[in-house]
């Protein structure tokens, strides 16, 4: 590649083809790649996943996708590419703190039927969602450049980008390169980051009792333990524990770890057999002060990272992707350049106002429900039983779990194309 060739000049360059970057690319390519005055869109992604055979064992890195995310992935034409055998609908969520027996009336349960919905969302493997979104982007005529982003220089009317395979230019650079975003760093966008001093242990497990298409989560006082129901009857666990406890749990022989899982889960799914390696993920929070700079936008984990206890990271990121795509489509219709400041400002205002309260709420859940034993934690636990008593309050939370609250981009509201 060289900066001189027309082939290396793009209107929009998305750095990072993770689930969020790939979905933004597919939405944009479908809406603006084949219109009069089409935009030239490329994704820079060095680690493209291979297609997954439908009968391969399920991976442990999964996400709970909301209804809004389902709609966005459908608008990107990616949803139909995810093999049904690898998608697990979950119909209920059961949450209970230590001291409350599992499956007792005091455990807080959200049921999709209560909101007239068939389910609350789907559990899907991250790499399968990523693969489907990249495949949809390519099928719509997009280009994936298999190279790593090294640095960029933002000029008044274009951006110069150096990659591991040469240089290129674009009118707009989109940083979708995850929590340690180099695009963010090169654009000089400040990020406030901190450690939760917790590690998430992730693995797949078989249990003697059926998961009943329910996402189970226990607040332990030292963190949270979640069992996410998978399509093959197994469950994906996410055990977020303080760093020292996590180190002990990771060092344990498998049988001892399984006994600890049984104890921590209060036996809600019977005895537990771990069937994949245990993966350790240090947990951090991060919020970029600004989501945009001149000719640059951040989406997904490049812009914000939240605690996984509410299963919101990729859902927020897909809403970023759909919002940015909508702002760029509206601007394109008005004849504006892809890197014009107006649509970027609109995107930033829109998403910052939605993400800030969500990030605050997730941090409060972590601090007062998952951890701590002070008076505020006691109050928060009493709050759970109050929520449990009111169908109306439950519906309020279900709408949020479905991702259908707040100011939504059109693609999140209904599974229709953007244009
Ligand atoms: C334990 C755990 C459980 C979670 N569970 C959920 C859940 O249930 N629901 C949910 O919504 N979220 C969940 N999340 C959060 C979710 O995993 C992330 O929010 C999501 O992966 C972010 O997607 P992304 O595309 O923004 O970034 P990433 O997935 O990090 O993708 C970034 C991409 O950029 C590429 N890249 C990086 N650097 C460069 C470079 N220099 N050049 C080119 N490309 C580059 C990478 O190869 C990668 O493909 C969970 C997180 C954790 C830790």
Image: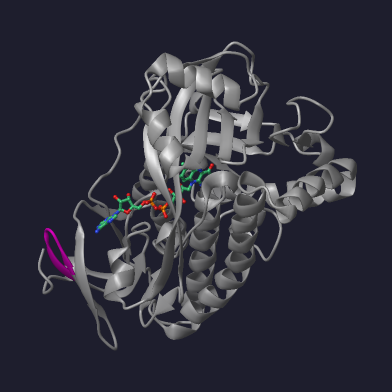
Residue pictured at 44% horizontal, 33% vertical: 202
Q: Which residues are magenta?
A: 162-168
Quadrant containing the C terminus is: bottom right
Please determine whether, in this image, residue 33 is positioned above or below residue 210: below
- Residue 304 is situated, as x and y percent measured from the top left of the image, at 47, 62
Q: Looking at the image, can residue 12 be seen?
A: no
The one nearer the camera, 64 or 180, is: 180
Residue pictured at 54% horizontal, 78% vertical: 346
Q: Main secondary structure of the magenta part?
A: strand
Magenta span includes 361? no
- Residue 166 is situated, as x and y percent measured from the top left of the image, at 11, 64
- Residue 104 is situated, as x and y percent measured from the top left of the image, at 80, 26
Colour convention = one colour
Residue farthest to the front, as pictured: 374
Q: Quadrant of residue 384?
A: top right
Q: Quadrant of residue 60?
A: top left
Magenta span includes 165? yes
Please determine whether, in this image, residue 39 is positioned above or below residue 404: below
The one nearer the camera, 214 or 148, is: 214
The one nearer the camera, 17 or 91, is: 91
Please determine whether, in this image, residue 178 is positioned above or below residue 250: below
Residue pictured at 55% horizontal, 56% vertical: 316
The one nearer the camera, 304 or 254, is: 254
Please determine whether, in this image, residue 219 is positioned above or below residue 10: above
| Residue 193 shown left or right of residue 327 in the figure | left
Q: Looking at the image, can residue 220 be seen?
A: yes
- How many numbered marks, from 0 up? 0
């Amino acid at each position: 590649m060289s900066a001189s060739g027309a082939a290396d000049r793009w209107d929009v360059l998305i750095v990072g083809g993770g689930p969020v970057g790939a979905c933004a690319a597919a939405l944009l390519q479908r809406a603006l790649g084949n219109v009069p005055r089409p935009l030239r869109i490329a994704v820079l992604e060095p680690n493209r996943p291979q297609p997954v055979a439908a009968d391969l064992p399920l991976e442990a890195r999964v996400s709970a996708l909301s209804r809004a995310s389902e709609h966005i992935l459908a608008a990107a034409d990616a949803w139909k590419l995810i093999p049904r055998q690898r998608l697990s609908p979950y119909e209920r969520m059961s949450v209970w703190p230590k001291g409350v027996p599992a499956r007792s009336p005091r455990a807080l349960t959200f049921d999709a039927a209560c909101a007239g919905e068939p389910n609350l969302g789907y559990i899907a493997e991250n790499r399968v969602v990523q693969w489907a979104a990249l495949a949809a982007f390519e099928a719509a005529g997009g280009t994936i450049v298999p190279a790593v982003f090294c640095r960029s220089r933002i000029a008044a009317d274009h951006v110069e980008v150096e990659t591991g395979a040469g240089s290129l230019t674009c009118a707009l650079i989109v940083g979708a390169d995850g929590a340690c975003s180099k695009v963010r760093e090169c654009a000089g966008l400040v990020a406030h980051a901190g450690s939760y001093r917790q590690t998430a242990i992730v693995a797949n497990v078989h249990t003697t009792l059926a998961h009943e298409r329910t996402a189970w989560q226990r607040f332990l006082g030292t963190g949270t333990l979640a069992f996410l129901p998978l399509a093959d009857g197994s469950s994906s666990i996410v055990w977020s524990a303080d760093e020292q406890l996590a180190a002990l749990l990771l060092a344990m022989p498998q049988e001892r770890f399984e006994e600890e899982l049984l104890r921590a889960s209060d036996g809600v799914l019977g005895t537990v057999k771990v069937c994949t390696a245990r993966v350790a993920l240090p947990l951090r929070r991060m919020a970029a002060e600004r989501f945009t700079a001149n000719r640059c936008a951040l989406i997904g984990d490049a812009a914000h990272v939240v605690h996984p206890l509410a299963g919101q990271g990729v859902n927020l990121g897909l809403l970023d992707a759909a919002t940015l795509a909508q702002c760029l489509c509206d601007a394109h219709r008005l004849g504006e350049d892809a890197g014009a400041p107006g649509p970027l400002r609109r995107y930033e205002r829109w998403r910052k106002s939605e993400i800030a309260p969500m990030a605050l709420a997730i941090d409060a859940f972590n601090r007062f429900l998952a951890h701590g034993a002070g008076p505020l934690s006691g109050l928060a636990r009493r709050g759970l039983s109050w929520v449990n008593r009111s169908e109306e309050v439950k519906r309020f939370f279900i709408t949020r779990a479905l991702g259908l609250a707040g100011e939504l981009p059109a693609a999140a509201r209904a599974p229709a194309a953007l244009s």
